[in-house]
Image: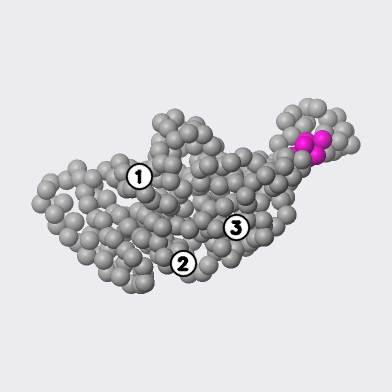
Amino acid sequence: MTKLTSILVATDLSTRSDRAVRRAAHIARAHGAALPVLTVMDDAMPAEVIDTLHAKTRAALERFVGSVCVGVNVTIMAKPGDPTTDILHACAEGIDLLVMGTPRVRPFLDLLRETTMQRIVRHTSTPVLLVTDRADHHYENVTSACDFSPASSAALRLAHAIAPEAKLHPVHALNVPYAGRLSRTQAAGDAIEASFRKEAAASARSWLATEALPTSHMTDLEILPGSPLPILRSKVELGDIDMIAVGAHGRVGSARSLLGSLATDLMRDPPCDVLIARP
């Protein structure tokens, strides 16, 4: 199992971020990992305002961290600056996992521009855990989108490291292109789906045989027809899923599409905690 040595949690002192700090402390305590806690204040203010805000912010953060991070090696960092730049810089300092809360939902604006969280995830090679739920329990059930790539393998391994006692439920979304156009009868449609399912099953067997995966904690891989996002959402709604683990495809870079549509869509409206890993 992967051992985490340093976990960074970024907070804006909101209730959403408080949940992230609690979850990060829980993981750090289990791994014996260092836990830098970072808050970045807007530096576009007069110096005297920044000085006053800095003192109040640090005092509030110290009180909260002191109450929830007992037994954890914590370092508090409160400073003015740019959140995206400073969090990315901190991630470059040997961080194994970045933990953040979800941003305030702004449906119209979020359709027009990236959130700070999306921008950070796109630009860092560090795995990111987005926390939505109260961190008052261990993760028990994790579902993972599997396309048999190195990224999906990395997501499963990291999910097991974060939640070693959890049951992992891998699922593969079976895409049957042009199914409606290619089949005029139900029988023809079933035959087409069976062909694609057979190919996916063969890929799954090869993937399971060649990748180092926590198979003892995994249920049998499900192959379900449809798109990944609706399938994952359904799993959360119908089951007792605590976390979704996905792999982010492509290199770290400036183009939004490099992150992958599934990871981007999950960040926009996460149905539960979301783990995003890179190969």
Task: Report the span colored magenta.
Answer: 195-200
Residue depicted at x 44% and y 35%: 252
In the image, taking residue 119 as reference, residue 198 lies left or right, namely right
Cα distance between the residues tagged 3 and 1: 28 Å
- The dot on residue 142 is 3
Spot occupied by residue 271 in the image (x, y as percentages of width and height): 54, 53
Which is in the foreground here, disc 3 or disc 2? 2
Q: Total number of numbered labels?
A: 3
Is 131 located above or below residue 148 in the figure?
Answer: below
Q: Secondary structure at mark 1?
A: loop
Pointer 3 or 2: first along the chain? 2
* Residue identifier under label 1: 92
Is 3 located above or below residue 107 in the figure?
Answer: below
Cα distance between the residues tagged 1 and 2: 23 Å
In the image, taking residue 71 as reference, residue 128 lies left or right, namely right
Is 66 located above or below residue 276 in the figure?
Answer: below
In the image, taking residue 275 as reference, residue 185 lies left or right, namely right
The answer to whether residue 118 shows anywhere in this view is no
Residue depicted at x 37% and y 49%: 94
Spot occupied by residue 170 in the image (x, y as percentages of width and height): 66, 51
Cα distance between the residues tagged 3 and 2: 18 Å
Pointer 3 or 1: first along the chain? 1
Q: Which kind of residue does numbered mark 3 sit on?
A: Val
Split into 4 quadrants, where in the image is the N terminus?
bottom right
- The dot on residue 30 is 2
Q: Which kind of residue does numbered mark 2 sit on?
A: Ala
Residue depicted at x 29% and y 54%: 39
